């Protein structure tokens, strides 16, 4: 028997809603022919932005959107993307395979998208090939309400009031395609950029430095050391370090939808590496910043499969199965459990690229299993993390094993407890006994995401193959719940 | 983003004919499906070549597919919104 104990009266830390954030890059069909179809498109749109996508992202309570990259951010020059669209220069997006970029989706369009969704923008500045002046002026253009060259230029382009954007990234992957920098050099650049990105009235910036790639612990250590005057005392107001970790698929196959149990196991095993990364990077950060003033932001994460057969390899368009849903659930539970340090995450990417929420084909649109996990898990946003002890059986495959049961729990502002659980075993249902302590449980309801096959996925002709259903596998006796979780499933429970 | 081995950063959206041929052959081998006649295939590709949504001579911007692959398949249709051309 698997046993879980949840204490509802001892929660200390908030699960920041921004953990459920997104990332949208100028890559493949994420922006163009994804969100952006243009004002003249027969596809229903609001100022060029697809209405059906906005509606879906609102429903999932999308809290933020990172843009314009990714690798693209470090060759993006924001002034190319403002003013009359027909006058904007066309450039070559060299990071993503020589794509022609006409700059029709720029600062105004992105911030309009965020306003339509109701989410906060997270803008990543250009450090790799840009200048301090360029980024400083972008902040001025977006956030300054007074009279200045950039604020006046914004008004000339049709926007009177500033957007007051809080989240600003200082470069992307500067250890790699963002400039191939050493951490010592980048740490100095962050201080310089941070100095000139001004806090205008009514908007204190939240400045985000490029952190490590996966298990590059040296990068974290150097940055934390060089940007602090003394341990725990920051010289400049850098608020967060990022982490990028992709969960590359496959043992025998890298297909998104044609794989065996060996591939299923390997993928979930790699997803769980996220916990180890957060523990180890967190320990380094704790040495320099025991008060946890600097956040860890996982602003690129998700699965990476082969592109769908017959599609352009440079577009990174991949399908999304129940396996991706399990990866999302495992990672979101990990982020929740680390919420004292992890305060934002951005899955890659929202539409048509990598582990997408949404796929489009012409006017057709489908919601992926990953989308459904995000929608189910939205109950944790800004709730208080509840301590949860899990005793779980192992899901064994060959000589290796991973925990069968994973989960997290939270208490929301209305006094409701939410528990999310995953069963990673694709062949065996699991029984879970949950002991809820600290408050009385009167009622339990739930939803489940599962399917008959582990490769199940949604297509444009069968868009509802994998979707949440009412969950009836819970029996309550007092404050003890007995939950029967089908194989390969994700469950959310609401206790009131 | 950077995958290990950095496929993304090095992959080009501009494909050589040999790459298109390989992708088509791989697709047909792994996804056996009814095909159109050579005449219909040529007609479809002619429409695609004249379409403003064709990118890099190979790729339909509506779906990201290589038209040389999709036009070959009997049950596929032009994905242009509300007005499919074939």
Image (cartoon, coloured by chain):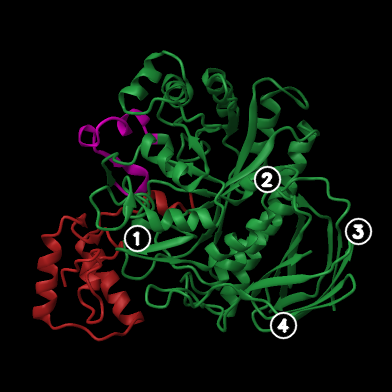
Display colour for chain A: green
Q: Nearer the observer, disc 3 or disc 2?
A: 3
Subunit that carries the residue with mark 1? A
Front residue of A171/A461: it is A461
| Dot 1: element | helix
Q: Image point 68% across, 45% down: which residue?
A: A16
Q: Do tag 2 and tag 1 residues touch (Cβ < 8 Å)?
A: no
Q: CA distance from mark 3 to mark 1?
A: 53 Å
Display colour for chain B: red
Q: Nearer the observer, disc 4 or disc 2?
A: 2
Would you name the residue on which mark 3 appears?
A438
Q: On the same chain: label 4 and label 2?
A: yes
Subunit that carries the residue with mark 4? A
Would you name the residue on which mark 1 appears?
A313
Is residue A70 in view from this perspective? no
N-term mark: 4 or 2: 2
| Dot 4: element | loop
Would you name the residue on which mark 2 appears?
A16
Q: Nearer the observer, disc 1 or disc 4?
A: 4
Would you name the residue on which mark 4 appears?
A429
x and y percent of residue A23 in the render?
49, 48
Q: CA distance from mark 2 to mark 1?
A: 35 Å
Q: On the same chain: label 1 and label 4?
A: yes
N-term mark: 4 or 3: 4
Q: Which residues are magenta?
A: A75-98
x and y percent of residue A482 in the render?
82, 77
Report crowding for label 1: few under 14, some 14 to 19, many 20 or more residues within 10 A (C-alpha). many
x and y percent of residue A177 in the render?
45, 40
Number of disc labels: 4
């Amino acid at each position: 028997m698997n046993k879980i104990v949840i204490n509802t009266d001892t929660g200390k830390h908030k699960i920041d809603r921004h953990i459920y954030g997104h990332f949208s890059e100028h890559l493949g069909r994420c922006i163009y022919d994804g969100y952006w179809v243009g004002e003249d498109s027969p596809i229903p749109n609001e100022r060029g932005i697809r209405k059906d996508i906005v509606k879906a992202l609102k429903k999932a309570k999308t809290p933020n959107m990172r843009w314009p990259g990714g690798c693209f951010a470090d060759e993006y020059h924001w002034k190319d993307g403002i003013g009359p669209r027909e006058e904007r220069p066309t450039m070559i997006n060299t990071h993503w395979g020589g794509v022609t970029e006409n700059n029709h989706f720029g600062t105004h369009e992105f911030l309009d998208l965020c306003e339509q969704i109701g989410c906060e923008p997270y803008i990543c500045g250009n450090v790799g090939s840009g200048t301090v002046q360029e980024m400083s002026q972008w902040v001025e253009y977006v956030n300054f309400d007074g009279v200045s060259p950039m604020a006046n230029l914004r008004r000339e382009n049709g926007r009177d009031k500033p957007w007051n954007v809080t989240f600003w990234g200082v470069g992307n992957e500067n250890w790699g395609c963002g400039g191939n920098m050493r951490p010592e050099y980048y740490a100095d650049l962050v201080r310089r950029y941070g100095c000139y990105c001004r806090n205008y009235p009514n908007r204190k910036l939240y400045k985000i430095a490029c952190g490590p790639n996966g298990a590059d612990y040296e990068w974290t250590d150097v940055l934390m050391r060089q940007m602090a005057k003394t341990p725990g005392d920051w010289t400049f107001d850098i608020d967060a370090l990022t982490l990028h970790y992709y969960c590359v698929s496959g043992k025998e196959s890298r297909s998104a939808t044609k794989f065996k149990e060996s591939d299923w196991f390997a993928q979930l095993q790699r997803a769980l590496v996220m916990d180890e990364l957060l523990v180890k990077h967190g320990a380094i950060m704790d040495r320099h910043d025991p008060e946890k003033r600097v956040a860890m932001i996982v602003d690129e994460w998700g699965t990476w499969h082969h592109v769908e057969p017959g599609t352009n390899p440079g577009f990174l368009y991949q399908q999304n199965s129940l396996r991706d849903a399990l990866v999302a659930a495992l990672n979101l539970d990990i982020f929740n459990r680390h919420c004292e340090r992890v305060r934002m995450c951005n899955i890659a990417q929202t539409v048509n690229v990598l582990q997408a929420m949404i796929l489009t084909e012409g006017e057709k649109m489908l919601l992926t299993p990953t989308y459904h996990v995000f929608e189910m898990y939205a109950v944790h946003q800004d709730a208080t993390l509840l301590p949860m002890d899990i005793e779980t059986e192992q899901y064994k495959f060959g000589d290796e094993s991973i925990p069968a049961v994973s989960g997290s729990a939270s208490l929301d502002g209305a006094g409701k407890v939410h528990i999310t659980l995953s069963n990673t075993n694709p062949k065996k249902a699991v029984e879970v006994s949950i002991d809820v302590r600290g408050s009385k449980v009167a009622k339990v309801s739930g939803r489940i995401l599962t399917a008959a096959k582990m490769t199940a996925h949604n297509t444009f002709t069968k868009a509802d193959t994998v979707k949440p259903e009412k969950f009836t596998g819970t029996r309550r006796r007092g404050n003890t719940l007995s939950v029967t979780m089908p194989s390969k499933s994700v469950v959310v429970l609401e206790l009131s | 983003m950077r995958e290990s081995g950095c496929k993304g950063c090095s992959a080009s959206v501009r494909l050589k004919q040999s790459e298109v041929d390989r992708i088509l052959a791989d697709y047909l081998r792994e996804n056996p499906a009814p095909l159109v006649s050579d005449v219909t295939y040529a007609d479809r590709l002619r429409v695609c070549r004249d379409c403003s949504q064709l990118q890099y001579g190979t790729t339909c911007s509506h779906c990201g597919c290589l038209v040389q692959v999709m036009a070959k398949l009997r049950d596929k249709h032009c994905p242009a919104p509300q007005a499919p051309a074939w």
